[in-house]
Amino acid sequence: MNRIGDLLQRSIWIGPLIGLIVGLGLGLLIGWVVAPVNYQLSADDVVAIADSYALNASADLAKARMASLSKDDQARILSTLIQDRTTKGLAREADRLTALAQALNVTVRATSPSAATPSASATRAPTPGSPNAGISLNNLLPLIAIVAVAFVILIAGIILVPRLLPELRARAARATPANAKTAPATAAPAKATAPPKPGGLGRYVAAYTLGNDNYDTSFSLETAKQEFLGECGMGISEIIGEGKPDKVTAFDVWLFDKGDVRTVTQILMSEYAFNDPALRAKLASKGDAMLAEKGKTLRLETQSLAVEVQIVELVYASNPNIAANSHFQKLTVEMVPLLKTG
């Protein structure tokens, strides 16, 4: 049952993951296209860049720091700052600003003393993107791709997860033990033309023959409207001896109920295995031990399902090197699942 818990824990991350992807796509769409924000330099920033240039004389660095401003804006701000410093008698600052303008290849224009002076306390502030930034197809394509992928994942999650989760729970709940062998079903289900009892879900036959070393068959239980209810089946539980073919001494017959989210199991044991205390103790953790006998019937029940199992054929294999009645040549069981009512 630990695998069921792991499965459910993983599945609860699907919703948040889809939300994260959708949120990221929408955020990028709004931030890059719908309402892009572009940060411009303040007057104090330009003065600081001029001071820095006076110390390091790096024109490339100065250009990089002023890159967020257009040439016209650089010329306008520098012209205003130089005029302001000159008017106030701050010749050294005016010279530094003039040197920065030359490094930027910006033509400084003379301004009237009454020109608006940039506020020294101005700080960096977000301003809407300039009209000339434009919205190009190249900008839109990555965002469209992100939103499209997020939308596909969202739709897939909404449609597929509810359908797949019951089946995944069924597989996890009936996971076979480490020493059991698994393989695709080899016996095709055979439904009766009419349910044998009220609430019947059909009739199935599981048949094993010596040499089918990977025997494990299961049958999906569904309503007439194709609603998945659970599964039942039979598989190899224990082998003895060495060499091939495997010598099967016990089978597990099981019923899984989707609504109950659990599996009930009974172990059909050969006469030899049933009378061996060590083998019975080993298999006790898998389910209730039952001696396999031709004609014997047993019943497995969960909260809403039941399955009546009858052993219709049992033949022991003959091997002089192994104890008599220790492993099966053939074992065929008929399973009649029922939907409990009331």
Image (cartoon, helix red, strand yellow):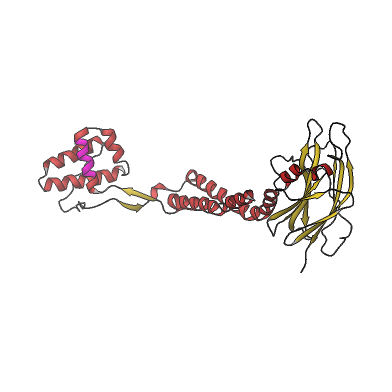
Residues shaded magenta: 46-54
72 or 312, which lies in front? 312
- Magenta segment's dominant SS is helix
In this image, 317 relative to 235: left or right? Answer: right
Q: Is residue 64 above or below residue 156?
A: above
Quadrant in which residue 74 is drawn: top left
Q: Position of residue 85 (x, y in %)?
A: 14, 46
Q: Position of residue 63 (x, y in %)?
A: 29, 37
Q: How many marks?
A: 0
Q: Position of residue 17 (x, y in %)?
A: 54, 51
210 or 65, which lies in front? 210
210 or 92, which lies in front? 210
Identify the residue at image location x=52%, y=45%. 141
In this image, 79 relative to 126: left or right? Answer: left
Can residue 281 be seen here?
yes
Q: Is residue 208 magenta?
A: no
In this image, 212 relative to 116: left or right? Answer: right
Identify the residue at image location x=70%, y=43%. 177
Identify the residue at image location x=69%, y=40%. 178
The quarter of the picture where the C terminus appears is bottom right
Can residue 130 be seen here?
no
Q: Position of residue 43 (x, y in %)?
A: 23, 48
User: In the orientation shown, which residue stands out farthest toward the bottom?
Assistant: 342
User: In the orientation shown, which residue stands out farthest toward the left?
Assistant: 89
